[in-house]
Each structure stands twice: as C-alpha cells, then as structure tokens.
Image (cartoon, rainbow, N blue to C red):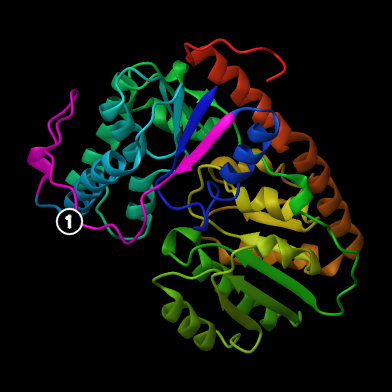
Amino acid sequence: MNILQALFFPPEQPGGVSSMVPYIQEAFTDKGWEMELFSLPKRVRSKGTEDVAFETFDWRPFAGNPVVDKYMQTYKDYVWWTRMRIRKSYDLIHAHHPIAGLVMKQLFPDTPVLVTIHSSYEKELTLNGKIAPGGPEETFLTSLYGELEHKLDGIVTVSHSFKRYLSGFVRNGDSIGVIPNGFDERRFRPVSHDNAVSQLISVCRLVPAKGIDVLLQACSELKRRGHPFVLHLIGDGPIREELEQLAVEHNIYDETIFYGYMLHPEEFMPFFDIFVLPSRAEAFGSVFAEAALCCLALVGTDVGGVAEQIEDGVNGLLVPVNDPQALADALEKMMSDPDYRYQMARSAWLKAKSTYSLSRVIGQLQQLYSSLSRVPFSDDE
C-alpha cells in the first residue's frame, strides 16, 4: 500500500506530530509499505491564489479577521504547493492538520483521506490571547470540524477528552476514532543519577497556554520555603522575554536556565529529576509520555490528555490549572522524598512503555488504513 503522510509543519518542527510521524514512516517502511511525508515549507508564503469554497459553511463573512485571512491564505498556499510538488497517486492519504486534510481531499477526491487532529488551534489562540472566546475567528475555526466530517473518510484524535471536545462541533461524534500518540522506545534511555540539588525540567513552546508563568510563581514559592533547585526550560516562543523578566521579578533568574529550542530534548531529559508543565490545555501532551520514558517524575495539570496519562498519586501528580500554590506543593512533595519521586517515575515509565509504544500505534493504524483503503494487502505487509 502506498500512503502519504500529509503534515502541516515540516517534520523537524517541535511538537507531538514531529516526534511521532517520522518514526511511523520508518516502522511501516520496515514492514514493506510505501510511505512518504509531505509538508508546506515555512518559506512558502502568499503564493496561492485559487478561490476556496467549503460545502458546510460560507467562510467569506469571516474574511477581514486577521486569523481567518492568514488561515485561508495558508490553505491557498498549501493547494499551490501540493499541485506543484505531488505528481503521483496514493492508495490513502493520512493528514495531520485540518488544512492538509481538506486540501488533499479537494485535489484527490477519489483517494481515501484520513485526518488526525492533534490539537485545537482555536483553544490555543484563545488561551494565548490572540482571539476572543466566542468571536468570529473561533466560530470559523470550529466550523472547519464539520467540514472535515462532511468531506473526509475518517477523523481520529489523540485522547478521549479531545474527542469529547470535537464531538460538540460535528454531527456524529461517536465516529471519531482515538489513537493516543506512540513513541519509539529506542529514543529514550533513562540514566541512573543522584542530583544533590533537585533538577526540574519543562519542554514546551513559550506561549501563555503552557502556563510557564504559573511555574515560575511556584518556583518562587519553593525558594521562599528554602528548597534549592534548578529549573531548565527548553523551548522558545513569543513570550520568552516576558518570562525571563518574570523570573527576575520572582527572584529565581539565577535558578532558571532558558535554553531555547532544542531538536531532541529526550537526549537531555534523563539527567534531571522532575518533569513539570502546568498547561492550561492539552489535547494529548506528548512531552509527558516522552518524559515518562526518560524515567522522570511527572507533575502536570488536570486537563485534557495530561489527565489521561497521569493518575494522581499513582504515576505522577496533578494540580488544578492556574494554581501556583498547589503546583509548589506538588513539586515540594516530589523534591522532599526521593523514594516517593522514584516510585512515581518508575510507575510513569512502566505505563508509558505499555500504553504509548510505537508498535501499538502501528497496529492501530494498520487496521485503520486497511478499513479505509480500496487496495487489499496481505497480513505480512
């Protein structure tokens, strides 16, 4: 079977898609399948000019809003780039972004097209203060879910909580599949270590939705309580300078290291003690599974896919969103009791190995591809 994985960002970009799809390609190639990756380069801007029409709603009344205009121009650019670059047919196309899915179905109407929705663009924009809740941009973006349901051959997402969210915008939410992300264990090598000072690490894009401001407040409280630590922040984003200034204001700049973007943070994480990310929303939260596979203790917020990965007090600790005191308490509990921290890290590692293996994802995808494709294939493919 010949399959195209249609991404939005190039695979070297940070995020859960990039940490999984290239390894899916490798695994399927090892099985003898043909699989290619396709994406829109970041340098392609404002090239597309074709008109766009959706069948379930009219997008034109939303024109003039900056987010909508940017989204639609990107859609046109994706059409332009796809027409220029793809010269062959595929048995099935698996898209990983609404734009990619809708464009591929537009250009290849006779090919089965499946989309995995990895996150909510509208929720991220709202939490990051870019659009108003309930405004025209949010209405436009959520209307696209109905268009996906109408045109595509299948919709999958990465957590049951995100499926419930998506179900509010489609006719048949029960038809949405759930395939949690999976990871190649060979990438993760836990390292035995004994740090004299607690080493905290967080990996994310530096945007308000990730709650790093709350983490800095919690760390300030830890310092006030007399707990030494080093906070390692891997990632970059539009509010980096604001967060650096916040670290200064909370008197923890000397304890905090801002690394910027790192391509393979899993090579770095095993030497630390606690992974913490107080997100305000997460469809899945791939970095928690990655940290678990590095055998780190986990502290997260009780939201979305994070709460499906962490069972509070069993394989990590969950705290409410926007609660720096509760976050400080959870970190203090992990930092003050090495045996408890090891127990949490060990439990997280065991769950991640059994639940978030790449082989599980490959098996689920193989069944899904088989059900959607019109091309028969043998069991040993």
Residue 310 sits inside the magenta stretch? no
**Mark 1: secondary structure:** helix
Residue sitting nearer the eye, 304 or 370:
370
Residue 60 sits inside the magenta stretch? yes
> What residue is shown with label 1?
66
Question: On screen, 210 above or below 193?
Answer: above
Q: Where in the figure is residue 304, as x and y percent of width and height? A: 54, 41
Crowd around label 1: few <14 · some 14–19 · many ≥20 (10 Å) = few
Please tell me which residue is depicted at 89% across the width and 69% down the height of the picture: 193
Query: Which amino acid lies under the numbered mark 1 shown in the image of this protein?
Result: Pro
Question: On screen, 55 above or below 262?
Answer: above
Residue sitting nearer the eye, 306 or 71:
71
Quarter holding the C terminus?
top right
Quarter holding the N terminus?
top right
Q: Where in the figure is residue 142, as x and y percent of width and height? A: 29, 36
Residue that extends furthest to the front in the rendered view of this protein: 87
Magenta segment boundaries in residue numbering: 34-63
In this picture, residue 219 sits left or right of residue 145: right
Residue sitting nearer the eye, 253 or 264:
264
Q: Where in the figure is residue 44, as x and y percent of width and height? A: 28, 57
Please tell me which residue is depicted at 27% across the width and 39% down the height of the picture: 83
Q: Where in the figure is residue 185, as x and y percent of width and height? A: 77, 46
Choose top left, top right, bottom left or bottom right for residue 96.
top left
